[in-house]
Amino acid sequence: MNAEDVGILRHPQGDPALVRQVLDDLPDWFGQPDALDHYVAASSALPMIEARHLSNPIGVACLQATLPGAVEITCMGLMRAHHGRGFGQALMAGIILWARDHDARLLVVRTIGPSHPDPFYARTRRFYTACGFLPAFETTELWGPENPCLIMVLPLVPPIAAH
């Protein structure tokens, strides 16, 4: 398998059955039934980027324009068999293109923060960091003290030159 063989599709609305199919393959990340049901239900009202390999769906990302100039990745998953092969980077490239096409200057994602010992979310943070995301802050105000939330951001515009 080769990451160059991945196809990226844009959907104006998500496909809840496809989102469930992908996220069900990732119980170490999406193992809380209430949270999983929320992501699946919310996907029908959000634009979705789909990654396909050999005509088979392998990953999804749901996006939401939160404020003028900002887009949040509300949910992203890549089937486990495709981790570490460049498919996630290809999916992220599709996300970035969509965000730029919608005049976003900032891409935002929320994930479990580094104060939580979960090794799977440590992998997630490494992935986002490798994609250029920067940690902005961690808070327990969103998901509670048992699930510290890390806000990460990716600037989509060139940095301002220092004078």
Image: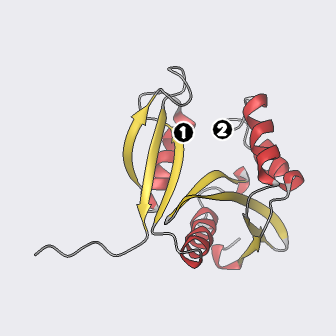
Is residue 136 shown above or below 148?
below
Q: Position of residue 81 (x, y in %)?
A: 72, 54
Name of the residue lying farthest toward the top: 145
Q: Quadrant of the N terminus?
A: bottom right
Question: Is residue 2 visible in this depiction of the protein?
Answer: yes
Number of other residues with Cα within 10 Å of mark 1, as a class: few under 14, some 14 to 19, many 20 or more: some
* Residue 32 pos. (x, y %): 73, 29
Asked if residue 7 lies left or right of residue 44, the reply is left
How many badges with numbers are in the image?
2
Q: Quadrant of residue 160?
A: bottom left
Q: Amino acid at mark 2?
A: Trp
Q: Which residue is mark 1?
A: 121
Residues under numbered marks 2 and 1 in contact, where contact means CB atoms less than 8 Å apart: yes
- Which corner quadrant of the image does residue 98 belong to? bottom right
Question: Considering the image in quadrants, where does the C terminus appear?
Answer: bottom left
Instruction: Indicate the position of residue 29 as horizontal and vertical percent values.
Output: 66, 38
Question: Looking at the image, which residue is at 82% across and 74% down?
Answer: 54
Q: Which residue is mark 2?
A: 29
Q: Amino acid at mark 1?
A: Tyr
Residue 106 is situated, as x and y percent measured from the top left of the image, at 45, 63
Instruction: Please report the residue visible at 43 percent of the width from the left and 70 percent of the height from the top.
Output: 156
Q: Compare residues 55 and 71 and report the one nearer the observer.
A: 71
> Which badge, 2 or 1, is on the more N-terminal residue?
2
Residue shown at 49%/40% (left/top)?
122
